[in-house]
Image (tube, grey):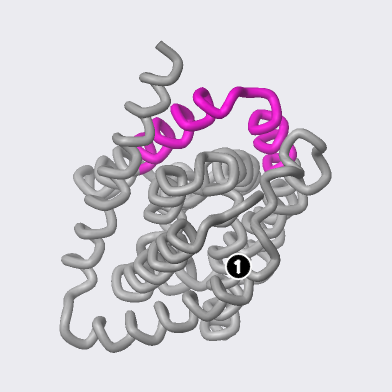
Amino acid sequence: MTLSLTAAALVLLAVFVGVGLQRVSGTGAGLVLAPMLTLIIGPASGVLITNITTAMSCVLLTWAMRRHIEWRRALWIIAFVLPGAFLGAWVVGEVSLAWLQVLVGGLVLLAIGTIVLVAWLGRLPHYDRPWIGPASGLLGGALNTVAGVGAPPMVINAQLTRWEHRSFAATVQPVFLTMGISSVVAKLTMDSVRAELPPVWLLPAALVAVLVGIGVGALVARRVSGVVAGQVALALAGLGGAIALVRGLLELF
C-alpha cells in the first residue's frame, strides 16, 4: 500500500481527532475513524488502520482502568471475538471495494442509529442470559473487522444485562483491544487483504497521534462536556458514514 504525504497527514489528523473525542466523550474512536479513513484511503485500508489504532489506544486505557475490569466476564466475551473477526475478514476478502465502502458507511450509520435509539429509550428491557456475552463478542468481532465498529453489540449487552457503568467502561477496554488485534491478525492471514497493509513507518506515527490525542483530549475534557464531545463525534461519524455509503453506491450504479 502506497501513501502520499498528504494522505498520511490526513490519516494522522483523523487518528488524533478520533482518539481525542474518545478521551473526552467515551465514544468509540472506531466509530469516528472508520468512515473518515475510508474516505481518505479506501475502505479496506481505512478499516485496517482503524483496527490498529483502536488497539493502540485500548492498551493504554486497559492499563489505566485495570482496577475496575471484570476479567472473568471479559474473557467469556473475548473467547468469541476471534471467530467473529475471521468471519468479518472473509467478508472483506470476498466483496469488492465498492461494496465494502457501502458496508462500512451503512454499518457506521446503523451503529449510530443503535446508540441514539438506546439513549432515546433510556433503558432496554432487562434480559440477562448466558448467551448474550458470547453473542456480543461474536457480532462485535465481525463488525469491527468489516467496518471498525464493534461497540454497538457491547452497548446493547450492557443495557440488557444492567451492567454497572464503571465496570462496563473498564471491562470493554480489553474486549475492544482483542477485537482490534483479532481483526488485524485475521486480515493478515487472508491473502485477499494482505496487500492492504499500511507502510511500516505509519504505525509509530499513528502511536504518537494516539498519545497526543489522549493528552489533548484530557485537557479539553476540563472545559468541554462529554455530552457535547459525544454529539460532535456522532455528527462526524454520521457525515463520514453517509458520504462513504453514497460514494460506494455511486461506484456500484
User: Dot 1 surroundings within 10 Å: few (below 14), some, or many (20 or more)?
Assistant: some
Q: Examine the image and state in which quarter residue 20 appears.
A: bottom left
* Secondary structure of the residue carrying numbered label 1: helix
Residue lying at 18% horizontally and 75% vertically, measured from the top left = 225
Task: Give coordinates of residue 104: x percent, y percent.
Answer: 46, 36
Task: Give coordinates of residue 51: x percent, y percent.
Answer: 59, 56
In the rendered image, the quadrant that contains the C terminus is: top left
Residue 101 colored in magenta in the image: yes
Task: Give coordinates of residue 3: x percent, y percent.
Answer: 57, 55
Q: Is residue 54 above or below residue 204?
A: above
Q: In front here: 197 or 146?
A: 197
Q: Is residue 90 above or below residue 71?
A: above
For disc 1, the marked residue is 202
Residue 33 colored in magenta in the image: no
Q: For the magenta stretch, what is the residue range?
A: 84-111
What amino acid is found at the position of numbered circle 1 in the picture?
Answer: Leu
Residue lying at 66% horizontally and 49% vertically, measured from the top left = 1
Q: In front here: 164 or 86?
A: 86
Task: Give coordinates of residue 33: x percent, y percent.
Answer: 43, 55
Apparent side of residue 179 relative to residue 83 in the rendered image (left or right): left
**Residue 56: in sight, yes or no?**
yes
Number of numbered tags placed on the structure image = 1
- The main secondary structure of the magenta stretch is helix
Residue lying at 62% horizontally and 76% vertically, measured from the top left = 204
Residue lying at 49% horizontally and 75% vertically, measured from the top left = 210
Apparent side of residue 41 relative to residue 39 in the rendered image (left or right): right
Q: Is residue 248 above or below residue 104?
A: above
**Residue 130: in sight, yes or no?**
no
